[in-house]
Image: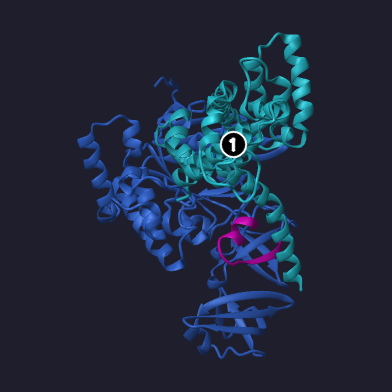
């Protein structure tokens, strides 16, 4: 009986989340002109058409670059915080943890609005603004796996390296980093995916020349209404994300 | 590497702690410790967990800095010198081998940091591995080794750099009993062969007594006694040392007076004389008497009833009640049987006067 409840709960949630996504993915390959089911035929014409829309093409590229750059910064910043937190107790350590994780509980929508006012006041341009926002939003996703990975790595390894003559930097690079490489990889993939699909804060901060794919698709759908173009572009986004996760799993799989 | 040269007295001391103290906030981990470890000796820091021995080790190794006092190595003040420049070989508790490196790479790490030539490095790594009997496993990863092999690898990694001081932090704690006994002998053999000044940190009294030239017993962040294994075992200075190093009968005596150089002390209603001066007449003093120093006999001023007997093979443990004071005796099984020792029987106890040790602290 219990099992029945569990299975139906899992089944319903899987159905509600996966089926609509699956439908979008399938529709993107439609040969027809409208959202119809079953598909009138298979083709990639909507991908071609999405690619020919300059705004979509440019925003796709911009999103990829933004995700790559912001995720690298997020991981580096989160690593600094995680190194401190995993080795020190006390008030400062707890404060760093809270600061790193707060974007997770804080609505991104409000964060976007706040950053918009802040950047306007400070004269920060849209690209830099988006970069900063994406770094802030993805830091918690990097911080968690990094802290976990560092806590699993005994400090005595680093001390052993130092007693053998390695300075702080070489003991980190040669001994600690190889232990946490899988965690760093996971962190980076998380950050990439978060940045790549971020919408709510980005809505406030995007502007001409600094338009991400989700925001572009959002407004494209609103004004042009060409649903299948959007489906194709979304599919491209989902496939890239899945590819990243798959690659991350492959490369950084725990030994 | 710049070091301040600060002359100390002309002794052969290799490592000197001078008034070293360590506080964490309001807690005092170490109280003003003075310690001098001689060149080539194996010195054991022995104590229960939380006694400050790990802190002492971390200060000596340079992982932490003392709140007060100075650390000298071969006459040089190293108090502010980081671990990476101290040239100490450390065998960590749990070994801390680098998991992503082979045994040879682990052992070669210190030489790599010293920028040695490839050929010389290889040769020194191999001879260190040969010394610990691990040359056939040079290409294995730590996780492919047994506990004993991991320890040998950790030892090889520590000695290959030809350290000024070798530090062993609870080196046997990850090993089982049989392996532990074997590694104690082996580490001692290697240490004596290389004549390396070695500090052993341990909570295991057998390990300390069996391996060390000298032992420092720590308790509550303070050194209670330093001496050869024999001297600290036979003549403990405090109740803590007497009980931490094996079993002991802790007795309470009262100083009755002096007969020449012999102090007359009453214990369990009888007076014994101890060759010891400087005790105040009428004072109550704590005494220690090791169970194996007591012999059973037919007649003695100390007659008592056998309360308990436990046969342990070659030795037998006997508990005898003398005027309400309980004595634990551990003796040769044959000798004890020869004294018609059975529960309920009356037996006599005797010992040599010098085996009763007057302790310096207040009996609890």
Give how far across and how far down residue B103 sits, in percent.
33, 49
Q: Quadrant of residue B74?
A: top left
Above or below, comparing residue B233 to residue B18 in the picture: below
Quadrant in the picture for residue A206:
top right
Q: In this picture, is B141 found above or below B78?
A: below
Q: Tell me, what hue is chain A?
A: cyan
Q: For mark 1, what is the residue?
A: A193
Q: Secondary structure at mark 1?
A: helix
Tell me the colour chain B is drawn in: blue
Image position, residue B125 (x, y; %): 27, 43
Q: Nearer the viewer, residue B78 or B321?
A: B78
Tell me, yes or no, if residue A41 can be seen here: yes
Q: Can I make out residue A68 in this image?
A: no
Q: Is residue A114 left or right of residue B333?
A: right
The 10 Å Cα crowd at callout 1, few under 14, some 14 to 19, many 20 or more, is many
Q: From the viewer's side, name the closer residue of B351 and A3.
A: A3
Stretch in magenta: B239-256
In what quadrant of the picture does the N terminus of chain A appear?
Answer: bottom right
Q: How many marks?
A: 1
Residue B136 screen position, x and y as percent:
25, 56
Identify the residue shown where x is 64% and y is 32%: A138
Q: In this rendering, is residue A64 above or below A11?
A: above
Residue B288 screen position, x and y as percent = 62, 63
Does the magenta run of residues contain B18? no
Say how the picture is coloured: by chain
Of residue A100 and residue B24, the one placed in the foreground of this image is A100
Letter of the chain that mark 1 sits on in the rendering: A
């Amino acid at each position: 009986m219990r099992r029945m409840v569990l299975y139906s709960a899992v089944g319903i949630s899987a159905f509600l989340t996966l089926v609509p996504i699956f439908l979008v993915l399938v529709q993107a390959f439609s040969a027809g002109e409208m959202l119809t089911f079953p598909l009138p035929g298979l083709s990639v014409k909507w991908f071609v058409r999405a690619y020919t829309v300059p705004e979509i093409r440019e925003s796709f590229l911009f999103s990829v670059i933004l995700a790559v750059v912001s995720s690298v910064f997020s991981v580096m910043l989160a690593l600094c915080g995680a190194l401190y937190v995993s080795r020190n107790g006390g008030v400062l350590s707890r404060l760093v943890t809270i600061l790193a994780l707060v974007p997770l509980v804080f609505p991104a929508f409000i964060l976007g609005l706040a950053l918009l006012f802040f950047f306007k006041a400070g004269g920060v341009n849209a690209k830099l603004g988006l970069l900063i926002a994406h770094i802030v939003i993805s830091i918690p996703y990097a911080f968690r796996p990094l802290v976990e990975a560092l806590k699993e790595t005994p400090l005595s390894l680093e001390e052993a390296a130092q007693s053998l003559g390695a300075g702080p930097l070489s003991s980190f690079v040669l001994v600690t980093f190889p232990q946490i490489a899988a965690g760093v990889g996971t962190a980076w993939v998380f950050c990439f995916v978060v940045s790549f699909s971020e919408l709510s804060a980005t809505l406030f901060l995007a502007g001409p020349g600094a338009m991400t794919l989700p925001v572009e698709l959002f407004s494209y759908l609103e004004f042009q209404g060409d649903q299948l173009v959007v489906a194709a572009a979304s599919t491209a986004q989902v496939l890239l994300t899945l590819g990243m996760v798959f690659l991350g799993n492959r490369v950084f799989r725990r030994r | 590497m710049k070091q301040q040269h600060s002359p100390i007295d002309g002794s052969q001391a290799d490592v000197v702690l001078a008034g070293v103290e360590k506080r964490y906030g309001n807690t005092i981990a170490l109280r003003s410790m003075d310690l001098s470890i001689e060149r080539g000796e194996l010195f054991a820091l022995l104590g229960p967990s939380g006694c400050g021995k790990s802190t002492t080790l971390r200060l000596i190794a340079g992982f932490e800095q003392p709140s007060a006092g100075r650390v000298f190595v071969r006459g040089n003040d190293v108090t502010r010198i980081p671990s990476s420049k101290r040239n100490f070989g450390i065998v960590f508790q749990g070994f801390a081998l680098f998991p992503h490196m082979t045994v040879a790479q682990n052992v070669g790490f210190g030489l790599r940091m010293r920028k040695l030539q490839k050929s010389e490095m290889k040769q020194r790594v191999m001879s260190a591995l040969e010394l610990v009997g691990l040359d056939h496993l040079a290409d294995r990863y730590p996780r492919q080794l047994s506990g004993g092999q991991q320890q040998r690898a950790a030892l090889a990694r520590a000695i290959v750099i030809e350290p000024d001081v070798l530090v062993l932090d609870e080196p046997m704690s990850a090993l089982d009993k049989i392996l532990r006994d074997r590694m104690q002998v082996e580490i001692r053999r290697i240490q004596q062969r290389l004549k390396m000044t070695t500090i052993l940190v341990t909570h295991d009294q057998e390990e300390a007594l069996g391996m060390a030239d000298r032992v420092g017993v720590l308790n509550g962040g303070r050194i209670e006694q330093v001496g050869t294994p024999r001297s600290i075992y036979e003549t403990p200075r405090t109740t803590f040392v007497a009980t931490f190093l094996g079993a002991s009968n802790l007795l309470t005596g009262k100083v009755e007076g002096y007969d020449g150089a012999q102090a007359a002390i009453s214990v369990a209603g009888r007076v014994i004389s101890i060759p010891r001066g400087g005790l105040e007449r009428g004072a109550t003093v704590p005494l220690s008497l090791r169970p194996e120093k007591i012999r059973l006999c037919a007649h003695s001023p100390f007659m008592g009833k056998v309360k308990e007997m436990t046969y342990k093979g070659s030795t037998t443990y006997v508990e005898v009640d003398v005027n309400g004071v309980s004595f634990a005796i551990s003796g040769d099984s044959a000798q004890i049987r020869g004294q018609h020792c059975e529960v309920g029987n009356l037996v006599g106890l005797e010992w040599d006067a010098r085996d009763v040790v007057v302790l310096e602290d207040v009996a609890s």
